[in-house]
Amino acid sequence: MKLFPKIIFTSFLALNLNAEVFSVFIENDVINGEDKHYTNGVYFSYLTNKDTNDSSKYNNSFFDLISKIPTFNNDTKYQTLGMTYSHLAFTPDNLDKKEKIIGDLPYAGVATLDFILYKWEEDFFHKYVITLGAVGGSTNTDNFQKSFHNAIGGKEPKGWNNQLKDDFLYNFSYDYGYKAFKYDFSYGKMDLTNNFKIDVGNYNRALMFGSMIRYGNNYPNNFNTVGKFLGVNENKLLNLDSKPNKNLGWSLSYGLAYSYTDYFYVSNYDKSYQLDKLKDTIVQVVSLDTYLENFVLSLSFKNSKFVRINGKSERENWGGINIAYLF
């Protein structure tokens, strides 16, 4: 497990040589006035230039290989490589108890590295992701969360000695999205983007499909999808350089998705916590995005069920802030 941070550092150095977009996303449940379950996530993302589909330009066997990955749309104009490092913290509802709490989410820290390939055109994309990661004390999430709570004056969680043990995580996901509708007004414009996502592995097994409608002005022709159940939405970083000019652009979006989760490691691996499978839930997302020169600032609000106990599940809220830079 100690090799994982070294792998992350080396991978980001390699990708940085050809990076086009860098993004930092923070997601937290402080907007809900509570501190429980999926309590915090920090995400760092890179996406490379979109001209990597021209494998002859690089004379590289790796690019030759990924260029041969099939899609049901036949060949696509562009390929984009990416990488996301994620660090997530999970806690039960009661942060005062030092003992293990049966019937609630366990303490858990998760760190993952996503290797991303987009094959895309202006109106649709295919996204392939291989995820490698770790859960447990090796992620150092307990110290991270305690420091964060001390900084904001929050309650210190006292049960991290009961966190899930170290384990290796792996996953594969496929995501397909397309622009179903676009319309220009005398002032502003609107679009609707649909997407379908499937996850398999020992970390997360789930299906998700949804739609996101957007209205704004002078925004880029990026892919404004609902994104993931948890975490950063790299789809919105794709094709950011298509913005018409450097002037201020903005957009307001609402997304609705259906998600079916058959297995999630944090809630379903250790059966002694007696948690049910989440199964189906409706996910809602509201997003305000601003674009100015090479910077993007996004604020998001997400609402969904997350933990299922004795056949019941309450809806929970998370707020997010994303800062992206194009270079």
Image: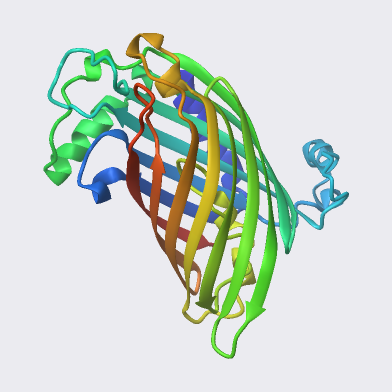
Q: Residue 150: x, y in percent?
A: 14, 38
* Residue 322 falls left or right of residue 239: left
Task: Please identify the residue farthest to the top as the structure is shown.
Answer: 272
Percent from the top left, x then y, of residue 76? 82, 54
Q: Left of 323 or right of it: where is 83?
A: right
Camera-side residue of 260 and 64: 260
The quadrant where residue 151 appears: top left
Give the quarter of the figure containing the N terminus. top left
Tally of marks = 0
Residue at image coords 27%, 32% = 144
Q: Can residue 327 be seen in this view?
A: no
Q: Which colour scheme is used?
A: rainbow
Pick the front one: 50 or 165: 165
* Left/right of residue 236 with respect to residue 150 in the rendered view: right
Q: Which of 147 and 213 is in front in this view?
A: 213
Residue under the image location 57 percent in, 47 percent down: 16
* Residue 143, placed above or below residue 28: above
Q: Looking at the image, which residue sits at the far bottom?
A: 186
Residue 281, x across and y down, in percent: 48, 39
Q: In this view, does 158 lie to the left or right of 53?
A: left
Residue 264 at x, y percent in the picture: 48, 25
Q: Is residue 280 something that shows in the picture? A: yes
Looking at the rendering, in which quadrant would you find the C terminus? bottom right
